[in-house]
Image (cartoon, rainbow, N blue to C red):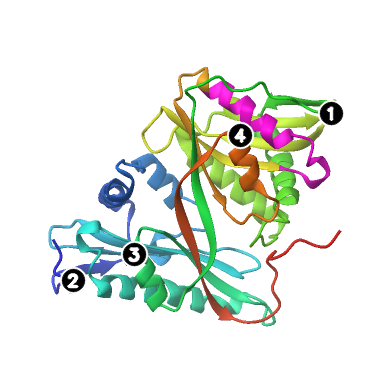
Amino acid sequence: MSSGEWHDDWTVRPCTFDDADTAVDMFNARSMHFYGENQTTAEDMIGWWKSPRFDLATDSQAVFDSQGRMIAWAHSGDPGEPYVAFGIGVIVHPEHADCDELWDRLFAWAVGLAKDRLPKAAPDLRVSVFENAMEADTARRGGAERAGFKIARVSNAMRIDLDHETPEPVWPTGVLVRSANVEDDLEAMCMATREAFRDHWGYVEEPLDQDLEGWRSWTASLGERLDPSLWFLACDGDEIAGLGLFSTRIGDDATRSYVESLSVRPGYRKRGIALALLRHGFKEVAGRDYKAVELDMDSENLTGALRLYERAGFRVMRRTLSYELVLREGKDLATRVLPVS
């Protein structure tokens, strides 16, 4: 166990793909500590590391002990245009979570890289850095707070056990559901999601070509978690009214599905489409012997999503805090409140 002090024989360097296995071990040590299960696979890790705007050589920093085991990790992502919301992540192995210097060095590195990229944003724009920390992860929260971050938002991890009969989905007149063809439907899914998320807290519009590149990268990185037959589109003729995208597993557990995305375009809301998408998905995954479905959602969602999920049968498992560090004040491109209709 750590003494809480920095060790002189620790090595700090960017990661390479050869570090994937030890990274998975460390990430899973953390998830086992907090969740009692492994949540990361090598496929997941490498898929993430191959993302177009993520460069291991510049965007990662890790600490290794004298045996070559990864004991801490940090990344500072390139968000692309308009460069106003930088996401970072700092993780420390539970055995060393009491070493404040580990957290502080890695938070300083991650924030420093975001600051280096600050000139990419227009000079009149508000620019922030975000980091998430589970409510129970007091060491990570302490590192964020010492680095100057403040809590901006709270999200819920939610779950429904598929141990009872799910009510039949009820679709509005003229709306039909089908599974996605990822290649053919990708641009339409991207466009529908952009429209649906414009009134979600923190949403920042990015150029369409960049957004499409992100969708292509994301779908490629999902690997075996992507089964297009579990990606459900609620369609009004040729128009996508809403999407319910379910994954095939959580970590290496193929008995649970995860809702990767659920959204309904504003013009189709308040017609029961989101609830119908969830219930349709529940029936489909239950028919494949899945035991539960999980998701993460903004507990203060501006459109009232928490009520929807509770009505669908989800319950809160744990809370995660979204921390924000404002690098520069200015014109805010992010959604914070809903427009008055």
Q: Which residue is mark 1?
A: 237
The reply to whether dot 2 and dot 4 touch (C-beta < 8 Å) is: no
Do tag 4 and tag 3 residues touch (Cβ < 8 Å)?
no
Q: Which residues are magenta?
A: 264-285
- The amino acid pointed to by label 3 is Thr
Q: How would you rate the neighbour count of disc 3 (Cα within 10 Å): few for under 14, some for 14-19, many for 20 or more?
A: few
From the image, tell me which residue sits under label 4: 312
x%, y% of residue 172?
Answer: 81, 28
Q: Position of residue 213 (x, y in %)?
A: 62, 50
Q: Is residue 279 located in the magenta-colored stretch of the structure?
A: yes
Q: Residue at 18% across / 71% down in the picture?
A: 4
Q: Quick one: label 2 or label 4, which is nearer the N terminus?
A: 2
Q: Is residue 184 above or below residue 56?
A: above
Local secondary structure at mark 3: helix
Q: Reply above or below: 317 against 114.
A: above
Residue at x 35% of width, y 71% of height: 142
Q: CA distance from mark 1 to mark 3?
A: 50 Å
- Type of amino acid at the residue the image marks with label 1: Gly
Label 4 or label 1, whichever comes before in sequence order: 1
The residue wearing badge 2 is 4
Callout 4 crowding tier (Cα within 10 Å): few <14, some 14–19, many ≥20? some
